[in-house]
Amino acid sequence: MSCTKISKVITLLFILFITTVSLQAQSLNGSPYSNYGLGDLNTFGFSGPASAGYTSSSLTSKRNFTFLNPASNGYMDFTIIKLGAVLKNVSQESGNLKGTYTEGDLSYIALGFPLLKSQFTKRKSIDTATKKEVLEKAPIKWGLSFGLTPFTNTAYGTNFNTDSSFGTFENIYNGEGGISRVFINNGIKIGKNFSIGHSSRFLFGSINDYRVYIFPDSLNIKGQQDHRRLALNGFQQTVGFMLNFNDSANWRNGKIKNKKKKASIYTHTLGGTFTFGSKINSNEQRLVQSMDYSNGNLILEDTLVFNEDLKTKVKLPQGFTAGYALQKENKWRVALEYKYENWSDFNPNNNNSPFSNSNFSNSNEYSIGLTLNPDASVESFKNIEVRLGLRHKESYLNFQELNGNFTNLTESGITFGLGIPLVGKYYGTEKRLHNMFDIGIEYYTRGKKESGLVKENYLNVTMGITFNDYWFKRRKIY
């Protein structure tokens, strides 16, 4: 089978995967941990870096960009289109109870392209041969990207009984919704080794919380339904930088020891981001109704509380990311990354809200990733990128165990993936485009099944596709 036919088959498989994920996205199953704060925070990454332990703050490429560090936009030479999806299989355990569910999400859609490629005068110097003054110039590049990604997800459902002086009553809790994120990233590369960037992210979405209290054994006590809806919108701002430089493995004191053998070139990249603390708009609606319980049916009666417009501000924390990558030409790349967010000052809304939890802590995430054949060639399918990663995260949620102690919700996982080059030609010419099909598997666990908590085991299958093209270039007609 030719490379072109293989590319078409892979593209068809990706479309089928997207269709399957779209159907699974209607699932109402979810994690009980999404009942707290703003829901489950997505450990987000495009499908390639996600398979390498989500290490993306120090990724530089002419054919790619990252969402996390906007400075990566300054390295782009192509127009880049990215699509991705994830399919999750989750098993849950708490005490003697077990359960599983499957759900899918469209992970991201993004577009990036170079806007400017020019030079600027760096300094004046004297040419030693001609004794004339010359101007040294350095390149400058500007790239822009934008797209849509998830920020948080809320999906939970639980039933339990509570004993009180009025008798035993049943609690039914359900929640759904989430917050999405539209981003616009700008990156400018100044000279050959340094770039800076800025990201403006608009958050929007809503969270619905349904709480029903019924007294099935009593004919005199009315039940109650409490429905709250929290609509959120606002901006986050992030700045980033990247610094990279090369060295040779065969130099000693400025001299190459073996002149017949070409020296191996190693590239070191430092990357970092800082996200500013921000306040986003919150609009809460609440409807409380009494109800009767008869023959297994719930009948709504009187309206007890109706608040249509409770406006407040939600304070989102500041945080930073630091990363380092070491790459040997197109042989391999090793990346380390650390992420921190100051959630201890998080103010979700107010103390009476179902979205509140007074026990938040700062989150820390550590990750390491290995990529073989980075920036794989599109000449054939032999140079497939192979990715492997490990990560450990201490989340922003704290929970009180049955013994009264508080424990931080942590998660640890391993990632693996392949990047398969797809053959593409530029408008019938011999110029080849660097398209890439990514497939990855991630397994991670979080929580524990003792002390009233829930242990969750996630097996995620991710797929993404990256298209390269030339836009905004005048074509020559011969």
Image (cartoon, rainbow, N blue to C red):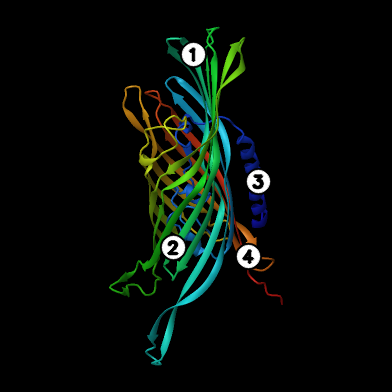
Q: Residues within 10 Å of mark 2 (few under 14, many from 20)?
A: many
Cα distance in 3D space between marks 2 and 1: 58 Å
Would you place residue 103 above or below residue 271 in this image?
Answer: above
Which numbered disc flags the more N-terminal residue, 4 or 3?
Answer: 3
Three-letter code, disc 1: Phe
What label sits on residue 196 in the rendered view?
2
What label sits on residue 15 in the rendered view?
3
Three-letter code, disc 4: Trp
Q: Are marks 2 and 3 in contact (CB under 8 Å)?
A: no
Tell me which residue sits at (48%, 33%) in the image.
34
Q: Residues within 10 Å of mark 3 (few under 14, many from 20)?
A: few
Q: Which residue is mark 1?
A: 169
Tell me which residue sits at (47%, 11%) in the image.
168
Q: Are marks 4 and 2 in contact (CB under 8 Å)?
A: no
Residue 251 versus residue 401: which sits nearer the camera?
A: 401
Which numbered disc flags the more N-terminal residue, 4 or 2?
Answer: 2
Front tag of 2 and 3: 2
Cα distance in 3D space between marks 4 and 2: 23 Å
Cα distance in 3D space between marks 4 and 3: 24 Å
Q: Does the rendering let one see residue 266?
A: no
Residue 195 versus residue 62: which sits nearer the camera?
A: 195
Three-letter code, disc 3: Ile
Tell me which residue sits at (45%, 45%) in the image.
279
Which numbered disc flags the more N-terminal residue, 4 or 1?
Answer: 1
Cα distance in 3D space between marks 4 and 1: 64 Å
Tell me which residue sits at (64%, 36%) in the image.
23
* Disc 4 element: loop
Q: Which residue is mark 4?
A: 471
Which numbered disc flags the more N-terminal residue, 2 or 1?
Answer: 1
Q: Residue furthest right?
A: 478
